[in-house]
Image: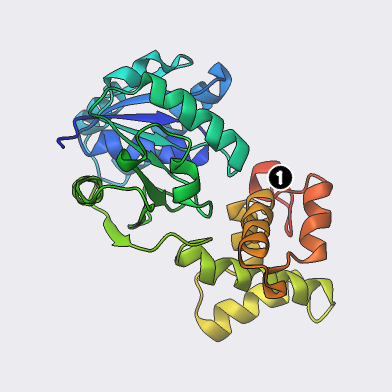
Amino acid sequence: MKINSVGILGAGLMGRGIAQVCALAGFNVHLVDVSQAQLQRGLESITTSLDKSVAKGALTAEARNDTVERIEASTSQESLERADLIIEAATENLELKLRLLSEVEKRASAHALIASNTSSISITQLGAVLSRPERFIGMHFFNPVPSMGLVELIPGLQTDDSVLQAAQGFVEALGKTGIVVRNSPGFVVNRILCPMLNEAIFVLGEGLASAEAIDAGMKLGCNHPVGPLALADMVGLDTLLSVLQIFYDGFNDPKYRPAPLLKELVAAGHLGRKAGRGFFSYS
């Protein structure tokens, strides 16, 4: 299964990051989103990121230009027909992902692999919507994609072994490390990380310390590079709430219940960095 071109469905934070690393690694990229404005923001973000690398001397101007030229952006899914691998990178919403995957399969060529960048939803459940679930796999990148070296590879119950092998080779070609994990809510990294973030929110909601003190405590006391509340803002509080709710429903265990303060902030539209306000304010 040779992969030369990659289709990416969704030009949000994750989709544009995946597009950048794929194009930088030499793959032709078909970036698709229903919103022309989102596509424009995605391309501008990629260009800005590459320009910073050039300024730092980590990338030549020629490589920067070649990378940009490899990315084709469109609001039509027709371009996905030319992709050897299609990665769905939409919002972490089960119904949305099921609908998009069903649509994508109608466009995908017979040989193409299909993947989801989901951070918590069952790969087996997502794959069940496809007529050929054996070519479907979870491929969970981490934010920010250009600088994070890990990709979780999650085969579903139906995933063929050859698809997993092809996915491993693709991740290596990106210069990243792939770890194979079993299909379970949140997989491995988020299964550990998200309850920690949730506990920090419980601590804040109970008034044990200020947001600044909580983050300073974890940075200085546990040597974390970023405090849990600042990290939650970076992830997106709505995304974190969705993941925790999937844990709570999937495991039927009260230890995964989302903190009331998290629910309140999401209801208020204080979603973190992307909204300009979460546990901290961003101008």
Q: Residue at x 50, y 70 (%)?
A: 225
- Location of residue 115 by image quarter: top left
Residue reaching furthest bottom?
A: 221
In the image shown, does 215 or 87 lie closer to the viewer?
87
Q: On screen, 75 above or below 105? A: above
Q: Is residue 179 left or right of residue 128?
A: left
Q: Evaluate whether residue 44 shows in this view.
A: no
Depicted 110 relative to depicted 241: above or below: above
Query: Which residue has dot 1 on it?
Result: 276
Against 231, is 17 above or below?
Answer: above
| Closer to the camera in the image, 211 or 137 | 137
Q: Secondary structure at mark 1?
A: loop
Query: Could one spot residue 101 in this view of the protein?
Result: yes
Lateral position of residue 268 relative to residue 71, left or right = right
Residue positioned most to the left: 2
Q: Residue at x 19, y 30 (%)?
A: 4
Residue closest to the eye, 28 or 119: 119
* Residue 244, quarter of the rendered image: bottom right
Q: Residue at x 59, y 61 (%)?
A: 231
* Three-letter code, disc 1: Gly
- Residue 135 x %, y %: 30, 39
Quadrant, the C terminus: top right
Residue 58 % position (x, y): 25, 47
